Amino acid sequence: MIQLTNVNKYFGPLHVLRDVNLTVKSGEKLVVIGPSGSGKSTLIRCMNLLEKPTSGSVIVDGVNITEPGAKVAQVRQSIGMVFQQFNLYPHKTVLENVTMAPILIQGIAPGAAEESGMVYLKRVGLDHKAKAYPSQLSGGQMQRVAIARALNMKPKIMLFDEPTSALDPEMIQEVLDVMVGLASEGITMVVVTHEMGFAREVSDRVIFMDEGQIMEEADPEHFFTNPTNERTKLFLSRILRA
Amino acid sequence: MNLFAGQQWQALFEARALFAKGLGQTVVTSALALLLSLVIGAVIGALGTAPWRIARAVNRTYVDLVQNLPLVTLVAILFFGLPHLGVNVPVFGIGVLCLGVYHGAYIAEVIRAGIQSIHRGQLEAAFSQGFTYVKAMRHIILPQAFQVILPPLTNQAVSLIKNSAVLNMIGAGEMMNVADSWAGQNSYYGPTYLLIWALFFALCFPLAQWARRLEQRAIRARGQEVQAR
């Protein structure tokens, strides 16, 4: 579904991704962990070309989006993304946030977009907030709306870039619950997170990144109980103790 | 000169049709110039935030060229220069053109700053949903930027109205011009310029007040947003 080949990314002199090769299968739930500055956010942002790789190729659903002239905007319609800072549109109501892109970009009839939008809002438990503005919601609620907004595009892939890192602790669970529910469906998911419990529970595979490289990848069972890489061990010992 | 000389005010009152025409000319010139400056400002300002280098260069060049030129000089250059190039524009048109071009540069800066004040994440969210740059600007960025832009934009409108007095130098028939030529004939300068002052004040003060109100409202709205986080 997603295939990264020899992906390198530089920010000026900074070599953020070093020759990364990664394939995400259709329906797979992949969790990416690693210390901050390890390149995991850059990696996930390369998957919908919010960051353009300096070299290498990214193929999504059979389309090479790193090729010049690739229809990136079109491919992005099938990749939902959830950001650390939510990035809801503050000048629009919750329901408008959820229906805007389907109507304007995908050409869905407003009535149909609203109907499906309400279904997704109900699923994240916020159908009663349809007419509210983002500034009237809590962080956890905003993030759940952001998930509904992405889902209403009927994406094949969902990318989560540290979706709970900006949340107060008591709001983390409500967002994770929605994500766990989503994971039980056929959708392909890539999640950058520090939530090890979530990784353990829902992922098919965990990759550990450090210094722009994939240091280790394994199924969660092996990854957490029997990591082979020294850095992974060190990282896990720190984060699981915390 | 005695400001309280009754016959001077009497004469001024009798010439009211003349001054009303001047006032009308000021209002129409300013309104059209404002429209032109908004169009120029929107286009040039948007170019300044575009992801393409050439667009940003066009923005820089325009803004730098115009902002570092006195309005009086711009008026003189266009008034004497255009006929030289075989372009004959009536004085009224030159007035609109000068004010529009001049304030277009300032409005471009206001609009550019307004767009840039919108968090980068907004554009990224729109991109991630398949918006193109132009569609993201239109539906996501500009509507939000507009709230930020409106108060300084209104101040630019006030500035523009006041600057229309400069067009006196090319005899554009706006109210400063009417005042100058009328008082020039009879030397009733005192009452004449006091009247012009009052008229400019009547045009500009409400606008300036409105801008202040918008600004306070914007600050309050932002405060609420910050609280919500």
Image (cartoon, grey):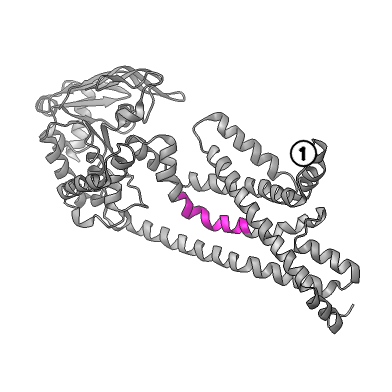
Quarter location, residue B156: bottom right
Quarter location, residue B222: bottom left
Q: Is residue A116 left or right of residue B188?
A: left
Q: Position of residue A124 (x, y in %)?
A: 17, 48
The span shown in magenta is B145-157
In what element is the residue under mark 1? loop
Examine the rendered structure and indicate whether residue B93 appears above or below residue B21.
Answer: above
Asked if residue A43 lies in the magenta stretch, the reply is no
Residue occupying image coordinates x 60% and y 32%? B57
Residue on which the image places disc 1: B87
Q: Is residue B92 left or right of residue B150?
A: right
Q: Is residue B167 left or right of residue B186?
A: left
Say whether residue A168 is visible.
no
Quarter location, residue A204: top left
Q: Position of residue B148 (x, y in %)?
A: 49, 54
Residue occupying image coordinates x 78% and y 68%? B18
Q: For the N terminus of chain B, which image quadrant?
A: bottom right
Q: Position of residue B199 (x, y in %)?
A: 70, 70
Q: Callout 1: 10 Å neighbours few (<14), some, many (20+)? A: few
| Callout 1 amino acid | Val
Q: Of residues A70 and A158, which is closer to you in this image?
A: A70
Residue occupying image coordinates x 49% and y 45%? B115
| Image mark 1: chain | B
